[in-house]
Image (cartoon, helix red, strand yellow):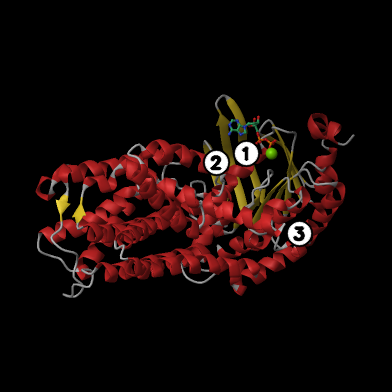
């Protein structure tokens, strides 16, 4: 029971910290932390989806940024054609990324281990080069969006603070949905397949179908993240789906602790804030950042969440 | 004579140049406990793997519950009522003992494409799981992580998982492998109680256990069925004694 209570405390702290960010910004007059908070939450949504695959299913996808890109391009392309309402753009963004996940997942999930990593990377690169070649939509340079999406005609996203809470709402919904999925019958089969796929098959589960469904769920959530990112930056570009971005997402969830949804959010925040902070010191921040990541990977098994758990045990004795 | 539950017809399987299943024809009748014995490397596990669908035979047919299942996937066979245990323990070490068994129940309790509700809290899954655990004497360990069980307890868990599948046929690949004297006796007692409830194929090295349990015995040597029949007949078969039992009985 103590475990359950602690399991609720951490997310409460996380979401309280997010909710307080705009208030802190208002008090200090530092509006930059609002846009930084928006960025953290948007990538946390994508990281939650990736952790579902990697942390709970051992499906190491190296092409997750493609879904962010697809969601973002759905907003950008629709807006270029004068369709600027979220009631259209959001369903389209989710459907496009979900369909891409279905089509590529059917192929990727026939492979395992390193091959799965390689083929998801290949599909990610395919999406990247396709976006780069979209001359009518900016090609390599990307595409500026005239204004953030409307919601049923209202400019609900226009104000940064209002948009912050919209994103927070989506993050909370994604987090709760992922938690429900992980604990559900579906999630138990998916988690079991990570531990012992042969056993799951001989129990009567078609492991492939469960993994494909999870892959589509993760793709749709990635699309949601892209929809929000395009609105946050009012810009889309092929860089959103670069393999580097896919790699960063993997680092975020490893950083936070694989197989922990709280960890996915914390890892994303730690990654982006550290990046922000170090790049303020020196332009060679990557020289510090790289080795730091290696240290976390080597010494903090279970990431930040795992480290915190071990510290707590140490204190209790 | 009753229609056999399982029928292997001229089954053949080779690994490279090594023929491991050599023209095996074999039947399991309703309610029967059919033991398959033979020296290490005789091809017993390979045979079980073909029946459960983890390996595809090179030739021959497998009929189960009145249909040809030779080309079916392992999960489709399991859904038809084919359950198995593994010689080398195959469980979910990170899951609790109860959840290992509850998953077997879940496979038979409607669709698992349910995304809401905590599976671990569902009485319709937990109650049959706990019943199966009680049957093998593992109820007290239900909440332990399966990976922390002793070797003998893991053997019992394998059996509980198979039981919870409510099988139409149970394939047991050396269920006592590596278990201690006492644990083996307990498992034999469990098998004796299960006998007759559903047909079983029992691969086992422990000859005391085999002769105590089997209705029929088939002896596999170099992938071939050397003899098949009632325990007494097999025990006294000079060919079997010469090839296998002679050394095993000493
Ligand atoms: N996947 C495999 N590839 C190659 N050879 C195998 C494979 N599986 C089993 N064998 C060989 O087939 C023979 C029979 O193995 P097995 O079926 O495990 O025998 P048993 O269970 O009767 O001890 C052994 O010689 C083993 O080395
Ligand atoms: Mg064997």
Task: From the viewer's perspective, tell me whether residue B28 is left or right of residue A253.
Answer: right
Decide which of tag 2 and tag 3 comes sooner along the chain. 2
Say which mark, if any, is on residue A97: none
- In this figure, which residue is indicated by the disc labeled 2? B55
Determine the residue located farthest toward the top in the rendered image.
B17
Q: Which mark is residue B46?
A: 1
10 Å crowding of disc 3: few (<14), some (14-19), many (20+): some
Q: Which residue is mark 3?
A: B195
For mark 2, give the secondary structure: loop
Chain of the residue displaying label 2 = B
Q: Is residue A153 above or below residue A55?
A: below
Mark 1 packing: few (<14 Cα in 10 Å), some, or many (20+)? many
Q: Are marks 3 and 1 in contact (CB under 8 Å)?
A: no
Q: Looking at mark 2, is its residue's CB closer than 8 Å to ligand 1? A: yes
Residue at 42% across, 55% down:
A269
Give how far apart the Cα atoms at labels 3 and 1 are.
Answer: 24 Å
Nearer to the camera, A12 or A184: A12
- Image coordinates of residue A53 in percent, x first then y, are 44, 52
Q: Residue A24: horizontal and vertical position, in percent?
A: 37, 67
């Amino acid at each position: 029971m103590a475990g359950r209570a602690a399991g609720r405390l951490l997310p409460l702290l996380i979401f309280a910290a997010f909710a307080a960010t705009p208030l802190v910004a208002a008090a200090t007059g530092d509006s930059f932390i609002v846009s930084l908070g928006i960025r953290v939450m948007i990538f946390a949504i994508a990281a939650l989806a990736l952790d579902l695959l990697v942390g709970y299913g051992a499906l190491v996808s190296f092409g997750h940024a493609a879904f962010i890109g697809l969601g973002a391009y759905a907003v950008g392309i629709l807006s270029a054609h004068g369709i600027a309402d979220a009631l259209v753009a959001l369903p389209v963004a989710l459907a496009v990324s979900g369909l891409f996940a279905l089509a590529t997942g059917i192929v990727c999930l026939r492979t395992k281990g390193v091959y799965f990593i390689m083929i998801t990377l290949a599909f990610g690169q395919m999406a990247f080069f396709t976006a780069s070649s979209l001359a009518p939509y900016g090609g390599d340079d990307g595409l500026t969006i005239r204004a953030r999406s409307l919601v049923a005609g209202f400019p609900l996203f226009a104000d940064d603070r209002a948009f912050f809470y919209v994103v927070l709402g989506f993050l909370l919904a994604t987090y709760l949905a992922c938690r429900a999925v992980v604990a559900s019958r579906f999630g138990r089969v998916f988690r079991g397949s990570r531990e012992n796929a042969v056993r799951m098959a001989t129990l009567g589960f078609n492991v492939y179908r469960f993994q494909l469904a999870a892959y589509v769920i993760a793709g749709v959530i990635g699309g949601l993240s892209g929809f929000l990112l395009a609105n946050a930056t009012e810009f889309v570009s092929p860089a959103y789906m670069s393999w580097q971005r896919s790699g960063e997402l993997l680092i975020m969830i490893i950083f936070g602790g694989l197989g922990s949804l709280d960890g996915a959010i914390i890892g994303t925040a730690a990654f982006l804030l550290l990046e922000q902070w170090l790049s303020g010191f020196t332009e060679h921040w990557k020289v510090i950042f790289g080795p730091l990541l290696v240290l976390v990977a080597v010494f903090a098994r279970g990431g930040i969440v795992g480290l915190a758990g071990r510290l707590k045990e140490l204190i209790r004795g | 004579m009753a229609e056999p539950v399982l029928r292997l017809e001229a089954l053949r399987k080779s690994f490279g140049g090594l023929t491991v299943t050599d023209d095996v024809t074999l039947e399991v009748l309703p309610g029967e406990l059919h033991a398959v014995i033979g020296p290490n490397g005789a091809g017993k596990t390979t045979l079980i793997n073909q029946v459960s669908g983890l390996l595809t035979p090179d030739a021959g047919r497998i009929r189960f519950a009145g249909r040809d299942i030779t080309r079916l996937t392992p999960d489709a066979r399991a859904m038809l009522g084919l359950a198995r245990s593994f010689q080398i323990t195959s469980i979910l070490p990170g899951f609790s003992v109860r959840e290992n068994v509850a998953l077997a129940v879940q496979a038979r309790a409607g669709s698992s494409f349910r995304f809401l509700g905590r599976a671990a809290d569902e009485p319709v899954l937990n109650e049959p799981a706990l019943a199966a655990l009680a049957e093998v004497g593992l109820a007290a360990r239900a909440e332990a992580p399966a990976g922390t069980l002793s070797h003998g307890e893991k053997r019992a868990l394998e059996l509980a998982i198979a039981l919870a599948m409510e099988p139409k046929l149970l394939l047991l690949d050396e269920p006592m492998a590596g278990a201690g004297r006492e644990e083996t006796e307990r498992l034999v007692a469990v098998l004796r109680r299960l006998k007759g409830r559903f047909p079983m194929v029992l691969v086992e090295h422990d000859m005391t256990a085999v002769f105590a349990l089997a209705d029929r015995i088939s002896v596999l040597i170099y992938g071939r069925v050397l003899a098949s029949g009632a325990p007494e007949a097999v025990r006294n078969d000079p060919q079997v004694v010469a090839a296998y039992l002679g050394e095993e009985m000493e």
